[in-house]
Amino acid sequence: MKHQEIVMIVDFGGQYAQLIARRVRECGVYCEILPYNKSAEEILAQNPKGIIFSGGPSSVNAENAPQVDPGVFKAGVPILGICYGMQLMAKELGGEVSKPEKHEYGHTDFYRNGSSALFEGVSEKTAVWMSHGDAVTDMPAGFGLTGHTDLTPTAAMADEARRFFGVQFHPEVVHTPEGTTMLKNFLFKICECKGGWSMGNYIDIVVENIREKVGKHNVICALSGGVDSSVAAVLVHKAIGEQLTCVFVDHGFLRLGEAEQVVDTFKNKFNMKLVHIDASKHFMSLLKGVTEPEKKRKTIGAEFIHTFQEEANKLEDVKFLVQGTLYPDVVESGTATASTIKSHHNVGGLPKDMKFQLIEPLRELFKDEVRELGRQLGLPEEVVNRQPFPGPGLAIRIIGEITPERLDILRRADFIVRDVIKQHGLYNDIWQSFAILPAAIRSVGVQGDERTYDYTVGIRAVTSSDGMTADYFRFPWEVLDEMSRRICNEVAGVNRVVYDITSKPPSTIEWE
Ligand SMILES: Nc1ncnc2c1ncn2[C@@H]1O[C@H](COP(=O)(O)OP(=O)(O)OP(=O)(O)O)[C@@H](O)[C@H]1O
Ligand SMILES: O=c1[nH]c(=O)c2[nH+]cn([C@@H]3O[C@H](COP(=O)(O)O)[C@@H](O)[C@H]3O)c2[nH]1
Ligand SMILES: NC(=O)CC[C@H](N)C(=O)O
Ligand SMILES: [Mg+2]
């Protein structure tokens, strides 16, 4: 995406790479994350005002340790190396990194040395957050010491002339209280960014980029009625109006009443062309006998695209497909640095022979940023605050083979979970809440004095800010009790209800 002013973050697999991105954007500077193995040309392609190297799990001295194309050091662009990023900078430019006896994790007192542009306005002694086993033991030529801690003599270094800065700690986490001051110094004083980026001008830039990219061609948008695709659709519609057709696929794994509700909202509230496709029989036949979660996801991902392709063939000159992909979908599906947790249907589940070019205007953003964008675009609160629902839908909430009977049970149980939550006014306190049917489990019950051997329904409800980590929601007992009683009384075939009390990690939000 083209921006007037951009900072690139090079990701070495660090836990906090996305947090760095968040902080930079919060400072009013647009940024994007790239994996470390991109070429200097790609990293520099958008003329970044600065580059930030993230932390990472490896040791720079290990075999196959992630490297960066040395070309980035020759471009005259300021660089801030954080933790692994600092160690890499040290090693790459001729310094030395080794493993001291003692490691530093968590809160540490940091003392400044001299006056570095990075630490302007920062206290002489300040709290920082550390998480490292290696440390710089010999700085490269041109660098001076700018800070130390009790255990780490070189906790910060700088070559002020070349505008290369390294910090062993993490300025991006909230536990480094003066971290934002340091990031601001880097962005505004060192990189000379002007700032002023906000969701508002993001809209203008994205709209202009889409117009330029699409030209006179036609575009379809994969619309689920969820927050992300609704925001994406409205953005693209703002850019190209009638050239856009939204395609909503009912794959048969939607929730009770969902299809009608999506069609109703989109026909009444938005003035957009919408095609509603009922492909439920076809999806069902493809998933017969499929139990392995990744196979389910990939089958669904591929069939989504085939369905869009068929629809596109009915229209003229469709070259682009819009999806509401977010950054977490991309990371979880696996990147050069991050391992694959699960293939999100819209990223890792895409077929290789796809003919569309993708337009994914939200690909660098997090959910809460997208909600903010939606508000700015004037989307109704009920759409903006909708809990997420995964593209593969109920198919990945039936653990085991999907059958019409199981779908019916899950759909009705899921409706009750959501209904009770809404009645107790808890919907907006919860990131996501739903029912799961672990279909392999049957257990003995006694109902109406008779033995039953029936399904168990699981309830899942979590709090989160971006879906990357989550905790289970602490329901009042009476709410759980109401769900349990209603599910067993109203859904035939269920004689047991359990509540999932695991966080993410170690679990994920969905069960498959
Ligand atoms: N039933 C569907 N029909 C058409 N496109 C879909 C459907 N389900 C998902 N998609 C596409 O896949 C993308 C990713 O799905 P995802 O569920 O992450 O986002 P969303 O549905 O837009 O928002 P939310 O996370 O709030 O549910 C969507 O943005 C949309 O482009
Ligand atoms: O559109 C989607 N396609 C998918 O394939 C998919 N898998 C998970 N999710 C949603 O992503 C968030 C994180 O989910 P997990 O903790 O289960 O990985 C949660 O909000 C999940 O509901 C998906 N959304
Ligand atoms: N957080 C980090 O970037 C850690 C860097 C490196 N793996 C170390 O232990 O020193
Ligand atoms: Mg969805």
Image: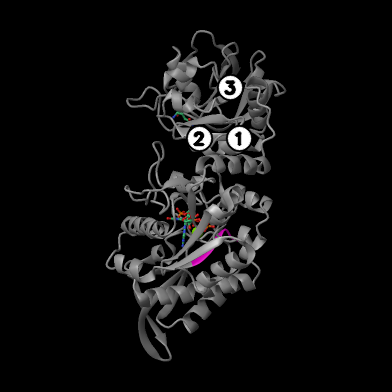
Q: CA distance from mark 2 to mark 1?
A: 11 Å
Residue behind mark 1: 30
Secondary structure mostly seen in the magenta stretch: strand
The answer to whether 69 appears left or right of 236 in the picture is left
Whether residue 167 is visible, yes or no, is no
Mark 2 or 3: the one toward you: 2
In the foreground, 512 or 221: 221
Residue behind mark 3: 149
Label drawn at residue 76: none
Mark 1 or 3: the one toward you: 1
- Secondary structure of the residue carrying numbered label 2: strand
Q: CA distance from mark 2 to mark 3?
A: 30 Å
Q: Amino acid at mark 2?
A: Ile
Residue located 49% across and 78% down the image = 487
Of labels 2 and 3, earlier in sequence is 2
- Secondary structure of the residue carrying numbered label 1: loop
Q: Position of residue 150 (x, y in %)?
A: 57, 21
The answer to whether 210 appears left or right of 69 in the picture is right
Q: Are marks 2 and 3 in contact (CB under 8 Å)?
A: no
Residue behind mark 2: 33
Label 2 environment density (alpha carbons within 10 Å; few <14, some 14–19, many ≥20): many
Read off the magenta span.
Answer: 430-434
Q: Amino acid at mark 3?
A: Thr
In the foreground, 378 or 347: 378
Of labels 1 and 3, earlier in sequence is 1
Residue located 59% across and 53% down the image = 241
Q: Amino acid at mark 1?
A: Tyr
